[in-house]
Image (cartoon, helix red, strand yellow):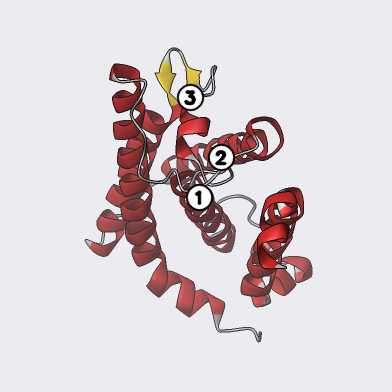
C-alpha cells in the first residue's frame, strides 16, 4: 500500500467516516440491546447470530457481569454511536467545534476502544465465543479511534508539535498500512485461539 495525500483525504472523508461508522455502530448496538432484553424476558430466546459453538451471541450476552451500573454494555453503545453520527452530520453542516469538544470526543473514543477490546479479549479467552455484532463494533471503533486521533493530531489539538514531527509524518503516510496490520494481528489471534474448532472443519 502506498501513502496518500492524507490531509486532503482525511478532511474530506472524515465526516462520512463518522456517519457511516455511527450508523453501523448504532445498528449493532440496537440489535445487541434487543437481544439482551429478549433473553432477559425469555431465557430460552435464541439470537439469530447463534451459528455454532464459536459464533454465538447468546453465550456472550448471557455471561454474567457484562454491565456498568446495572446497564448492559450495548445501551452505552447506542449513546456513543449516536454522538459519533451527530458529530459527522454537524461537520457536513459546517459546524465548528472548540478544542475542548474534540478532546472530550477523543476521550470518549479512547474509553470506548478500551472497553471494546476488554470485552473482545473476555469473549475470546474467558467466554470462548464470539459475537458478530460485537466484532463489527470492535472494527468500527478501531477505525473511528484511529482516524479521529490522526484528525485531532493533524489539527494540532493533541500536541501542536505533532504535525511537524517526522515520526508523525511517517505514521500519517502509512496510516492505512498500520490499520490493516493491526487487523491482521487481531484476526490471527482469533484464528489461532479458535483453530481447535475451525481447523477440523477445513481439513
Q: Is residue 49 above or below residue 15?
A: above
Give the residue number, with chain letter if any, for mark 3: 62
Q: Contact, CB < 8 Å: mark 3 with mark 1? A: no
The percent position of residue 86, horizontal first and vertical second, equals: 28, 48
Residue 160, quarter of the rendered image: bottom right
In this rendering, does residue 84 appear at all? yes
Give the residue number, with chain letter if any, for mark 1: 141
Label 3 CA crowd tier, 10 Å (few <14, some 14–19, many 20+): some
Q: Is residue 148 above or below residue 14?
A: above
In this rendered view, identify the residue nearer to me: 112 or 119. 119
Give the residue number, with chain letter if any, for mark 2: 116
Q: Position of 39 compared to 180: left or right?
A: left
Which disc is residue 78 wearing?
none
Helix, strand or loop under label 1: helix
Q: Is residue 111 above or below residue 44?
A: below
- At 73% across and 54% down in the image, what residue appears? 195
Label 1 CA crowd tier, 10 Å (few <14, some 14–19, many 20+): many
Q: Contact, CB < 8 Å: mark 3 with mark 2? A: no
Q: Contact, CB < 8 Å: mark 1 with mark 2? A: yes
The percent position of residue 143, horizontal first and vertical second, equals: 53, 58
User: Which of the image's four quarters has the C terminus?
Assistant: bottom right
Q: CA distance from mark 1 to mark 2?
A: 8 Å
- At 46% across and 48% down in the image, what residue appears? 51
In this rendering, does residue 161 appear at all? no
| Label 3 vs 2, first from the N-terminus | 3
Helix, strand or loop under label 3: helix
The percent position of residue 32, horizontal first and vertical second, equals: 37, 37
- At 54% across and 17% down in the image, what residue appears? 65
Q: CA distance from mark 3 to mark 1?
A: 23 Å
Report the number of numbered marks: 3
* Tag nearer the camera, 3 or 2: 3
Amino acid at each position: 500500500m502506498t501513502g496518500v495525500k492524507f490531509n486532503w483525504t482525511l478532511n474530506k472523508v472524515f465526516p462520512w467516516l463518522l456517519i457511516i461508522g455511527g450508523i453501523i455502530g448504532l445498528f449493532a448496538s440496537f440489535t445487541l440491546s434487543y437481544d439482551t432484553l429478549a433473553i432477559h424476558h425469555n431465557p430460552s430466546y435464541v439470537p439469530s447470530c447463534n451459528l455454532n459453538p464459536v459464533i454465538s451471541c447468546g453465550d456472550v450476552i448471557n455471561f454474567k457481569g457484562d454491565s456498568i451500573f446495572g446497564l448492559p454494555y450495548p445501551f452505552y453503545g447506542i449513546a456513543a454511536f449516536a454522538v459519533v453520527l451527530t458529530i459527522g452530520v454537524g461537520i457536513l453542516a459546517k459546524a465548528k467545534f472548540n478544542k475542548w469538544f474534540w478532546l472530550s470526543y477523543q476521550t470518549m473514543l479512547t474509553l470506548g476502544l478500551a472497553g471494546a477490546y476488554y470485552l473482545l479479549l473476555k469473549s475470546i479467552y474467558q467466554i470462548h465465543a464470539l459475537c458478530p455484532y460485537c466484532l463489527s463494533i470492535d472494527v468500527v471503533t478501531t477505525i473511528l479511534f484511529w482516524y479521529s486521533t490522526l484528525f485531532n493530531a493533524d489539527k494540532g489539538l493533541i500536541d501542536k508539535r505533532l504535525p511537524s514531527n517526522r515520526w508523525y509524518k511517517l505514521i500519517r503516510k502509512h496510516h492505512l498500512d498500520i490499520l490493516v496490520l493491526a487487523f491482521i494481528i487481531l484476526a490471527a489471534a482469533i484464528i489461532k485461539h479458535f483453530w481447535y474448532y475451525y481447523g477440523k472443519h477445513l481439513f
